[in-house]
Amino acid sequence: MTNNLTVPEKALVEALIVGLKKRLDDNLKGVRTDMQQTLEDAGIERLSVKLPSGLKVGSITTSAPGKKPEITDEAAFTRFVEEFAPTEVMTIKVVRPSYAKKLLDEMEARGAAEIVDPEHHEIIEVDGAEMKEGRAASHSVTWEKEGLDILAAAWRAGELDHIDGLPQLTSGGAQ
């Protein structure tokens, strides 16, 4: 790609690309935050991405936040496991990581900081654990076949210039 360039020209190309990427990344953070809020406010789960001509180039799909169990009080959790399954507590009173994972997986599947006692089939609240937000709501962009190339070509051709907030590139000596 840059085989015919001098070392200073290669350095300039890299600096330019790194700089543009930083500007785009900074811009993207704000755009994604605004888009996420817009999608949530409007109750939109899936949205087509179309050029002004109506040609679909991709889609945006939301994902809901999920709850995950988290051990919030190690001592209480250890006491719980010691009473419930004493062989799973090591001498130094630390819950075996594999057993903690098993309990956390079960709590995640149940959607609550509780497990089912396999012997008595009772639901037991787990001390020292509670449900917390596991990840924030988000969204993703997926592309139609060649959608990214079509979108890039439309952008380069100036077909999207009327949209505020899009980065603008000019070529050659254009001002």
Image: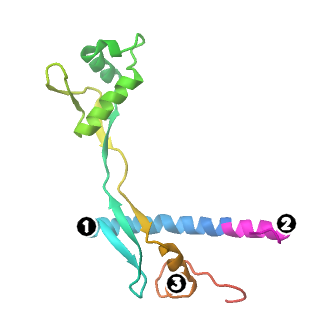
Determine which residue is flagged by label 2.
Answer: 7
Image spot of residue 68 (x, y percent): 32, 41
Q: Is residue 92 above or below residue 137?
A: above
Instruction: From this view, report whether residue 156 is shown above or below residue 112.
Output: below
Tell me if mark 3 has few (under 14), some (14-19) or many (20+) residues whose alpha carbon lies within 10 angstroms of its own: some
- Residue drawn 35% across the image and 56% down it: 137
Q: Residues within 10 Å of mark 2 (few under 14, many from 20)?
A: few
Query: Residue, x 67% and y 85% (percent of image)?
Result: 171
**Residue reaching furthest right?**
6
Q: What residue is disc 3 on?
A: 154
Tell me the residue that label 1 is attached to: 43
Give me the C-alpha separation between circle 3 and circle 2: 33 Å
Element on which disc 2 rests: helix
Query: Which sits earlier in the primary sequence, circle 3 or circle 2?
Result: 2
Q: Is residue 24 left or right of residue 92?
A: right
| Quarter of the image with the N terminus in it | bottom right
Overall secondary structure of the magenta section: helix
Residue 81 in percent (x, y) is at 29, 19
